[in-house]
Image (cartoon, rainbow, N blue to C red):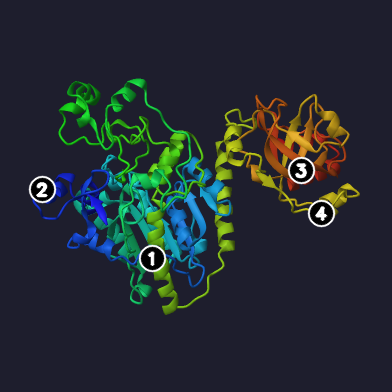
Amino acid sequence: MFISESNLAALTGTSLATTHSWAQKGIYKTYIDSNGTHGFMMEELLDIPEVYAMNNSNWYAELNPIPLRQYNSLELFAGGGGLALGMEKAGFNHILLNEYDKSACNTLRVNRPEWNIIEGDVRNIDFTPLKGLVDFISGGFPCQAFSFAGKQGGFNDTRGTLFFELARAVKEIKPKVFMGENVKGLVSHDNGKTFETICNTIKELGYTLVEPKVLKGIMYQVPQKRERIILIAIRNDLAKLVKFNWPSPYRRILTLRDALYKSEIYNTDVPASEGATYPEKKRKVLELVPQGGDWRNLPADIAQEYLGGSWHLGGGKTGMARRLSLDEPSLTLTCSPAQKQTERCHPLFTRPLSVREYARIQTFPDDWLFQGTMSDKYKQIGNAVPVNLSWAIGRSLIRLFNDIQNASPEDTPDCRKAIRDIINAHSKLAIAKNKKDQTSIIDKSCRQLNLFDLFELYGDSPVYTNNVISDKSYPYPNQQDIIQNLLEEKNVLVSYVKNEKPDNYINKQSTLYFTGKRFPSNIELKSIYYFMPYFKGIGIRDIYIVRKLKVGNYSDDSNKPDYRLAFEIELIGQLLDDYVKIPLKIWRTYSNYKLKDIIELQSNLNHKKDRLVFNTILQND
């Protein structure tokens, strides 16, 4: 099998000049392929360890391990889902994922609605309910603190210290195995002191660290020169019973051509998608760069002007004005395809790589939909673990877990209650924070919900559907039956009804309620169970159940959409004896109460025959 000088350099970690010298000196016999590319035959390079491993690979024999039981896994710092998707493909069952970035969380939710996603700071999550219930924990703890592209602050950088949050989760859960991944620069950072600290921490946790290994993406069906260090640790009581074997490499190196066109990893050419563009001045410069070239291929005067102050610096500066080559793997993707120092220009067109091209290079499937702005999408993809690399590691881990299961058999534990407890605790923390942030009954500082983002996330699908109360449960004959049968812990959204709307509610004919153009972001949408319309100068009385909640177009003109929250509602009956005025806390338009509070207040009202008591209690709620 043919391998070019450039691809052999990428495989062996040497320079192109080195592999070219091997050809010039006759160390290995050289060939020229049909495209005129100089290179070698892999069968004649078997004294090179990487080539030998690829030539004698067990890739296909290792391809589809079958889990002996369901292995529960938890992932931290999940990002846009590259690591999680590869592990799922290998056979792991994700019970919980945590990610701080909102857009990345939306990506995970859209593509895997069944996954439990906790959005927020990992420092605020208590993992102790999951002790003994999780087989595997993984996490690509943020690498900017250790990468050469970052400031290399290590543990002095708050991002670097997030490794210790992974360690805390391991300490609280005690999984059988855990994995961390990072940039290869982690090993050498601070003369090895950072890596030594990590290894000592793993030992203190009671785990045996498998000899760490830097895996090259190009050896695992990833068309990209991306290298990651993988840390795998096995709990001490199990480490003596089993041995972890690293995955075998693929038989050849995939190139950018395999990513952008129909190939052994994609059934079609890359679909069209959004993407960044160059300013005209930059485009004219890059138009002069050939495929696989960089600033050195420019006329000297143009190159000097383009590089600016970098012209006088040392180093090859090979990332500047760089155009990729179809017949080589892509350079490592960054969070932006058009940064001057790390240019990633399309090989055939003078433009940056598009979002979907970026995703293919990271081996995401075409049906994996990224959410957020275009910049958010590039960032999620650029930070991801390549899916195929994760898949290869995951297959080796499944084999390891099968060996553990054979050595120490046990059933998959039921962790559903623990997951609910963690999610509920995190939700209560978020609600408490929202309440703490409120400075007054009418919170003018409360941010409005971004309805456009919500529409992008859900489209025409419901944000929330409530099927708990069956049709046979109502209408209730009287108020007492309502109080006895309704779920009193559920939330009631009390909403102001504009002048043109009240008649339908007074006549009890409404089945749909549109919010105004603004809706407060501190009201948790999926907690809204009931709805009570508030009439100006009159108050509230009747109660409805919220059947569905979605984003709807309030305008009849589809060309000029006016997105609002639309509640599909159904009348339950009259909750209060008569209309009662209550204060609306947020923008004098909305309030969110528990049903039991309104019932209790109504009871006080009936007992004391004094409406002022009702209003006073609500104001102090």
- In the depicted structure, whether residue 332 falls above or below residue 246: above
> Which one is in front in this view, the residue at disc 2 or the one at disc 1?
2
Q: Quadrant of the N terminus?
A: bottom left
Q: Are marks 2 and 1 in contact (CB under 8 Å)?
A: no
**Left-right relation of 102 to 363:** right
Amino acid under disc 4 = Asn
Q: Nearer the viewer, residue 7 or 145?
A: 7
Q: In this figure, which residue is indicated by the disc labeled 1?
A: 60
Identified by mark 3, the residue type is: Ile
- For the point 18% across and 45% down, which residue is it? 16
Residue that carries the numbered disc 3 in the rendered image: 598
Q: Which mark is residue 485?
A: 4
Task: Choose the circle earlier in sequence order: 3 or 1.
Answer: 1
The quadrant holding residue 167 is bottom left
Instruction: Tell which residue pokes out farthest to the right in this image.
Output: 477
Q: How much space separates mark 1 and mark 4, taking CA atoms? A: 60 Å
Name the front one of labels 4 and 3: 4
User: Could you classify mark 1 by the number of other residues whose Cα lies within 10 Å: few (under 14), some (14-19), or many (20 or more)?
Assistant: few
Do callouts 1 and 4 mark residues in contact (Cβ within 8 Å)? no
Amino acid on which the number 1 mark rests in the picture? Tyr
The part of the image, by quadrant, that contains residue 291 is top left
Task: Answer yes or no: is residue 361 visible.
Answer: no
